[in-house]
Image: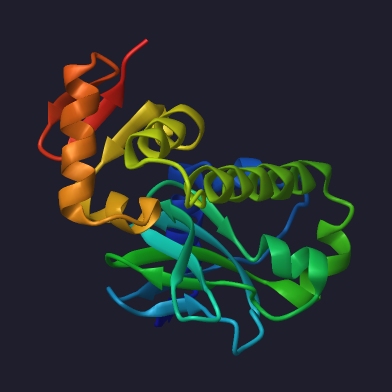
Amino acid sequence: MEKSYDAALVAQWLRRSGVDQWFDTPGLSFFLARFEKGEYLADPGRPLQDLMCVVQGTVQIYGLRRDGGLVPVNLSSGPTLLGDMEFVNRGLAPFFAQARTEVVCLCLPLEPNRDRLGQDVRFLHQVLHSFADKLTLFSSVDLPAATTEERVLLYLQQSAPDHTLHGVEAATLLLRCSRRQLQRALKSLCEAGKIEKTGKGRYCLLP
């Protein structure tokens, strides 16, 4: 991880990403953190020191079952809040968060700002939205009895940005299936007129 405290650069990222609209509290001191592909932003073995707003790159959030199986929670390439559960529970990170690409985060030290953020209505609304997004995706993909086609449709209907699947490889991690299973499901859904291929590895839900 590489940190930057350049105030002008931080302000530029805040405006560009829209993260400045997540807070009513004035005078919050953010810094930038850059993570390499494969690096962990958070894991259950260490306390999360900072709230992290992912503003560039893709982060995979997942848990592990007792048998070592992966439980996907979220995969995001848009502005995403990490640390929402830690803010509420005052505990260790419950999930792994790993950079799937190079990632840029706007970070805010958690403990020095906890009391003020607890009074920040706009921020608390953002925490609720963050919780809801992760819960929705978790509930839509963690259905062992559901077919791959059903999981794809649930993901596109309830969780995917713009109701679009971006990238087959990333989707296999989210939907807990093989590449072959997913490609077969996508072909079947296209033939049924439920989704449409709009580019390489990109499929959108049809009305």
Q: Residue at x 29, y 17 (%)?
A: 194
Indicate the position of residue 114 as horizontal and vertical percent values.
82, 68
Q: Is residue 67 above or below residue 21?
A: below
Indicate the position of residue 205 as horizontal and vertical percent values.
33, 22
Q: Nearer the viewer, residue 91 or 126?
A: 91
Q: Is residue 131 above or below residue 109?
A: above
- Most extreme residue toward the top is 207
15 left or right of 98 in image: right
Q: Can residue 92 be seen in this snapshot?
A: yes
Indicate the position of residue 139 as horizontal and vertical percent values.
58, 46
Q: Residue at x 30, y 37 (%)?
A: 165
161 left or right of 172 in image: right
Q: Can residue 167 be seen in this snapshot?
A: no
Q: Is residue 117 above or below residue 42?
A: above
Quarter of the figure with residue 40: bottom left
- Most extreme residue toward the bottom is 45
Quarter placement of the C terminus: top left
Q: Nearer the viewer, residue 116 or 175?
A: 175
Quarter placement of the N terminus: bottom left
Q: Residue at x 63, y 48 (%)?
A: 135
